[in-house]
Amino acid sequence: MAITGVVSFWVFPLLSSLVWMGMLLGMLLSWVIEDKYRHYDTMASRATIAFISNIGADRLQPLFITGCILTACLFDVGLIAEPILRLKGRLVLYKSTSEKVLCAFNIFFAVVGSVGLICLSIFRTGWPGRLHWVFLSLFIVGYLLSAIFLCAMYQRMAAKNPEHPELRVSFLMKLVFIILEMVLLVCFVACRKRKRDMSAIFEWTISFVFSFYVFHFVMDLYPAVHTVSLQSRFIAPVEDEKPGAPGPARAPLPARMLAIWRSRDPERQL
């Protein structure tokens, strides 16, 4: 599916991942090359490695804000596009209400994560105060819960559609992301107070892994380019006729009378 027939929806997660990766690399290289590992005012006194928010709260805040807004909006468009494509038969169809419910929770928590990410960039939260941790928690926990619900949905779809192995591949990729990010998140929180530099390294790692997570949604949406025509779309299977269900509708009375008259069978009754 494409917007006004110009841009396919798989482009949105691609652009989102590129924007996020480009923003992170730009901020990191700027701190290393231009700022010469500068110690920002928002950094802890003993810290030597800057957090993303430390750099984003300084002169590169316009880049930080722009990158976060574009990443969140583009990614959310891609997530919202998936159920639309499935309902239109452009992707493998849902086969149960639970799959639709899981998808709805996925989108809801993704929006929560997007709000946290955007607020984290707009407010100058370089200093690790209350606002910083609130918005950071919304960002990380929101997207992590979104991934968990989406992973559960793909697990169900893969089990019900074994003829589409790409669903299982996507499920496994999401599962790997969830496990990896949870391990990194535990390490990040554990090092937050006493080992600030290690905590910063884990934060950068979590953020870079997130860019690959966003990128892998291209694989989920790209198959829709092969189902543009109505003839190539997925169609819901017709349910078998249940016992006791009404049979095929009988022909209208005039048509039946005409058939009897043509057959000239005097023994046939109406």
Image: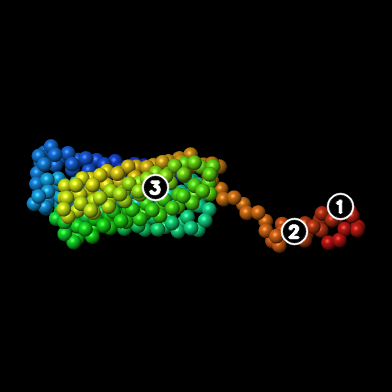
Per the model, the C-alpha gap separating discs 2 and 1 is 18 Å
- Residue linked to disc 2: 250
Please name the residue that numbered disc 1 is placed on. Answer: 263
- Pinpoint residue 132: horizontal percent, then vertical percent: 19, 57
| Residue highlighted by disc 3 | 175
- Circle 1 SS class: helix
Q: Nearer the viewer, mark 1 or mark 3?
A: 3
Residue 230 in the figure: left or right of residue 43:
right
- Circle 1 crowding by C-alpha within 10 Å: few under 14, some 14–19, many from 20: few
Q: Residue at 16% x, 53% y: name it.
A: 194
Q: What amino acid is labelled 2 in the image? A: Arg
Mark in front: 2 vs 1: 2
Amino acid type at circle 3 is Leu
**Quadrant that contains the C terminus:** bottom right
Judging depth in this view, the residue of 175 and 64 nearest the camera is 175
- Crowdedness of circle 3 by 10 Å Cα count: few (<14), some, many (20+)? some
Q: Amino acid at mark 1?
A: Ser
Q: Is residue 175 visible?
A: yes
**Separation of disc 1 and disc 3 at Cα?**
68 Å
52 sits to left or right of 80: left
| Local SS, label 3 | helix
Residue at point 42%, 57% (across, down): 104
How much space separates mark 2 and mark 3, taking CA atoms?
53 Å
Horizontal side of 132 relative to 41 (left or right) equals right
Q: Of helix, strand and loop, which one carries label 2? A: loop
